[in-house]
Image (spheres, rainbow, N blue to C red):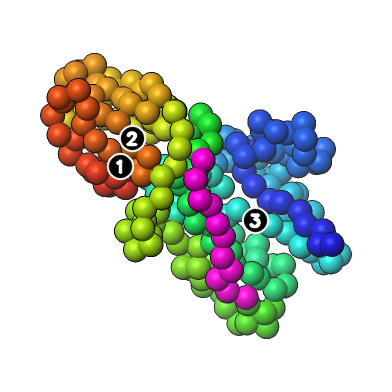
């Protein structure tokens, strides 16, 4: 039996806070949702990190999700240097573990999970002695390298698998609010697996492989993937 603790951002805890240990629920709900922190939140985070380090030195293992949120485009999102600083302060072994398929299962805007393959793989095991000889920035760079994932590149390399849902497009306009066809802002609306722009009237769908395709005789959608749309 392995006893572990979790470290995550407020928005990963808030919805299920009642099922979390009191301390995590309380500190989590006190922090800023978008990851920015005011003075009070920074103080709470410092206390939280102190308690995590105390747990580690007491023999517990900590599972950390350093990105703090789901990917909106299929690429691993930014990991802050403070993650490397925390790992260095812990003076313990570090194991990196990459999740594969997570973007297709639950992109950041998703209203529900999709059915499809999801797996994880161990990437690296680093001893306390190795980490002691590295700076916090080097540790962060190591974590970024090991956890990096490009969902569409892997899809091309390993083959496509369908992700079943009747709500694949719903709420995508939270992040993709500029129409790439006419340039209108906040005119995109989604329903089920499709979305349309009120500005130009074009319609498109998110298929089971997360490719973007025009529907209903609309103009060709200029991007095949969310990665390309986000880069634009």
- Residue 158 magenta: no
The tag on residue 211 is 1
Dot 1 and dot 2 residues touching (CB under 8 Å) = yes
- Residue 122 magenta: yes
- Precedes in sequence: disc 2 or disc 3: 3
Residue 30 drawn at (x, y percent)? 69, 34
Asked if residue 10 lies left or right of residue 194, the reply is right
The tag on residue 206 is 2
Mark whose residue sits in front, 2 or 3: 2
Q: Which residues are magenta?
A: 115-125
- Precedes in sequence: disc 3 or disc 1: 3
Q: What whole-number distance in Å separates the C-alpha atoms at marks 3 and 1?
A: 30 Å
Q: Classify mark 2: residues with Cα within 10 Å, few (<14), some (14-19) or many (20+).
A: many
Q: Mark 3 — residue?
A: 64
The number of discs equals: 3
Mark 2: secondary structure: strand
> Looking at this view, is 208 or 48 the one in front?
208
Q: Classify mark 3: residues with Cα within 10 Å, few (<14), some (14-19) or many (20+).
A: some
Q: What whole-number distance in Å separates the C-alpha atoms at marks 1 and 2?
A: 6 Å
Q: What whole-number distance in Å separates the C-alpha atoms at marks 2 and 3?
A: 31 Å
Dot 2 and dot 3 residues touching (CB under 8 Å) = no
Q: Residue at x 24, y 35 (%)?
A: 213
Q: Residue at x 33, y 35 (%)?
A: 206
Q: On the rendered image, what quadrant is the N terminus found in? A: bottom right
Mark 1: secondary structure: loop
Q: Main secondary structure of the magenta part?
A: strand
């Amino acid at each position: 039996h392995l006893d572990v603790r979790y470290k995550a951002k407020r928005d990963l805890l808030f919805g299920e806070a009642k099922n979390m240990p009191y301390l995590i629920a309380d500190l989590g709900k006190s922090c800023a949702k978008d990851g920015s922190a005011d003075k009070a939140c920074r103080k709470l985070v410092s206390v939280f990190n102190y308690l995590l380090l105390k747990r580690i030195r007491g023999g517990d293992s900590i599972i950390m999700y350093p990105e703090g949120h789901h990917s909106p485009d299929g690429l691993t999102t930014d990991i802050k240097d403070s993650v490397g600083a925390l790992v260095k302060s812990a003076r313990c072994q570090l194991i990196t573990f990459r999740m594969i398929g997570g973007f297709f299962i639950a992109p950041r805007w998703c209203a529900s999970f999709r059915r499809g393959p999801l797996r994880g793989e161990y990437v690296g095991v680093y001893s306390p002695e190795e980490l002691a000889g590295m700076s916090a920035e080097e540790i962060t760079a190591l974590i970024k390298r090991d956890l990096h994932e490009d969902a569409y590149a892997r899809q091309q390399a390993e083959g496509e698998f369908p992700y079943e849902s009747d709500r694949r497009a719903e709420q995508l306009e939270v992040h993709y609010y500029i129409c790439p066809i006419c340039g209108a802002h906040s005119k995109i609306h989604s329903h089920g697996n499709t979305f349309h722009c009120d500005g130009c009237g074009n319609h498109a769908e998110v298929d089971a492989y997360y490719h973007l395709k025009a529907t209903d005789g609309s103009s060709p959608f200029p991007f095949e993937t969310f990665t390309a749309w986000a880069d634009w």
